Image: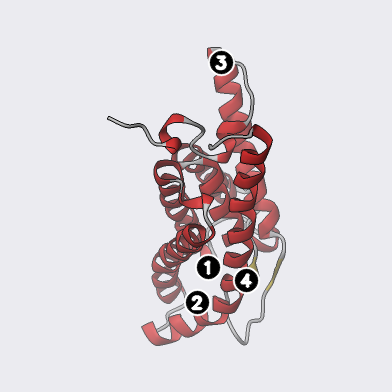
Amino acid sequence: MAVTAVEAGPRVLTDLIPWSNGRAQTIAREGVLALTGAALVGVTAQIAFTIPVISPVPFTLQTFGALLVGASFGPARAALSLSLYLVAGVAGVPWFADASAGYAMASFGYIPGFLVAGVLVGALAARRGTDRKVMGTVGLMLLGNVVIYAIGTPYLATAANLDAVTALEKGVLPFLVGDALKILLAAGLLPGAWALVRKAKGQDV
């Protein structure tokens, strides 16, 4: 049976990082990557502002960070990174939006959404190489955003006592333009990174 380029070579961008192959080195590598991914999402969450009249949900780069971790880390590493981000934030690490922590905010439901969406995006990137082409990346990011909204918006409705229409007006509609811009950014960044890798190696990966 023929082996595809994705199966034969690096499956996601973090596979390109050179590491030693010993057991201790592998554990250290995965720990470093988990911390790096969680920290990246935490940093993007601080690029935030809230307009209470429009929505109780902060406008952030957090979604972009979570989906970028998913696509570049793959499903297992994304699960570790985003689980660490979620658990540590609930435990008190102030790296949710606006340096917040805990789960007593109406927008908390979007954070588990990051985890589910990141793992899904990572699986598609790893198994199908979806992040290596512009249109594939656009589709990947769209799917990730839909998953995040599907989990976060019902939580918002319950936590803030909103009906379904108001929850959409507060938790989805204000963010669509920003999400479109972040999708375009990812559509340039991820395929661009793979193009640089191919150029550097002088071969298909």
Q: Position of residue 193 (x, y in %)?
A: 64, 47
Going by the numbered disc 1, the residue's amino acid type is Ser
Question: Viewer-nearest of labels 2 and 1?
Answer: 2
**C-alpha gap between disc 1 and disc 3:** 41 Å
Q: Are marks 2 and 1 in contact (CB under 8 Å)?
A: yes
Q: What is the spatial separation of the Cα atoms under label 2 and label 1, in whole angstroms?
A: 8 Å
Q: Considering only vertical position in the picture, is 65 above or below 72?
A: below
Identity, as a three-letter code, of the amino acid under mark 4: Leu
Mark 1–mark 4 Cα distance, whole angstroms, equals 21 Å
Residue 57 is labelled as: none
The label number, if any, that marks residue 181 in the structure image = 4
Of pointers 1 and 3, the one earlier in the residue sequence: 3
Say which amino acid is labelled 2. Answer: Gly
Left or right: 46 in relation to 151: right
Tell me where residue 81 appears, x and y as whole percent: 55, 41
Q: Is residue 134 left or right of residue 98?
A: left
Q: Earlier in the sequence, mark 2 or mark 3?
A: 3
Q: Which residue is mark 3?
A: 21
Q: Nearer the viewer, residue 155 or 23?
A: 23
Asked if residue 73 can be seen in this view, the reply is yes
Q: Residue 178 appears in which quarter of the rendering?
A: bottom right
Q: Residue at x 62, y 21 (%)?
A: 19
